Amino acid sequence: MPLVGAAVVWGFVLLILATALPIVTPQAPPSFAPPPPSASPDGAGTPALPPPASGPAPAIVRVPQVTLVHYYGHSVLLLVALPAFASFVVGLMLWMSVAKRSRAAGIGAWIVAVIVLAAGIIGFFTFLFTIGLAIVPIGVLLIFACTRAAPLSHSQTGVV
């Protein structure tokens, strides 16, 4: 069960990171500007371009970032806590699978572990890249824990 323990700990680390690590770049809502004034006096023609800048190149501006909790509020912690909760549930189901010899608990642990891994992969390939990247290790740890404690093959468990 050390793999499940590592998954639970990583889930709690994600909770701490959601409150401490600035990863969200706040964006202002889109605004619409009027068209630029034209270069010709009658208003028909090409827009006037600003004069070329002289001097050193502009410095790269640092974009401010905030934490998940700062941007989305404390309710985001419920979502961030889901991987830790799922890890705890998988650990409980694996314990039941081994201690009570419950095949249903082992299958349930596999289902939850696969859901966590799938959610991390889906998040990784969508706009939730950073969050998905953080959840995939939990899913992998849970899959390895299921492989060791509740293998799907009958020959490995000795049950016929």
Image (cartoon, grey):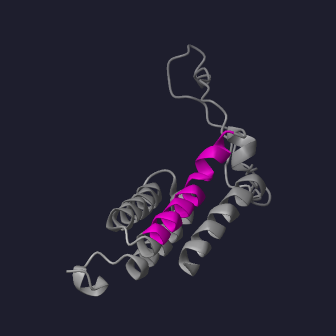
Question: Split into 4 quadrants, where in the image is the N terminus?
Answer: bottom right
Q: Nearer the viewer, residue 122 or 118?
A: 118
Residue 106 shown left or right of residue 141 in the figure: left
Rendered position, 48 above or below 85: above
Position of residue 25 measured from the top left corner of the image (x, y, whole percent): 67, 48
Instruction: Say how many tags the image has.
Output: 0
Q: Main secondary structure of the magenta part?
A: helix
Snapshot quadrant of residue 13: bottom right
Rendered position, 149 above or below 35: below
Q: Nearer the viewer, residue 54 or 112?
A: 112
Residue 159 shown left or right of residue 127 in the figure: left
Residue 117 shown left or right of residue 30 in the figure: left
Position of residue 130 measured from the top left corner of the image (x, y, whole percent): 57, 59
Snapshot quadrant of residue 69: top right
Question: Split into 4 quadrants, where in the image is the C terminus?
Answer: bottom left
Residue 4 shown left or right of residue 157 in the figure: right
Q: Nearer the viewer, residue 97 or 24?
A: 97
- From this viewpoint, which residue is outermost toward the front? 100
Rendered position, 10 above or below 46: below
Q: Nearer the viewer, residue 42 or 65?
A: 65
Position of residue 66 measured from the top left corner of the image (x, y, whole percent): 75, 49
- From this viewpoint, which residue is outermost toward the top? 42
User: Where does the magenta region start and end?
Assistant: 75-96
- Is 79 a magenta residue? yes
Tell me which residue sits at (43%, 64%) in the image: 113
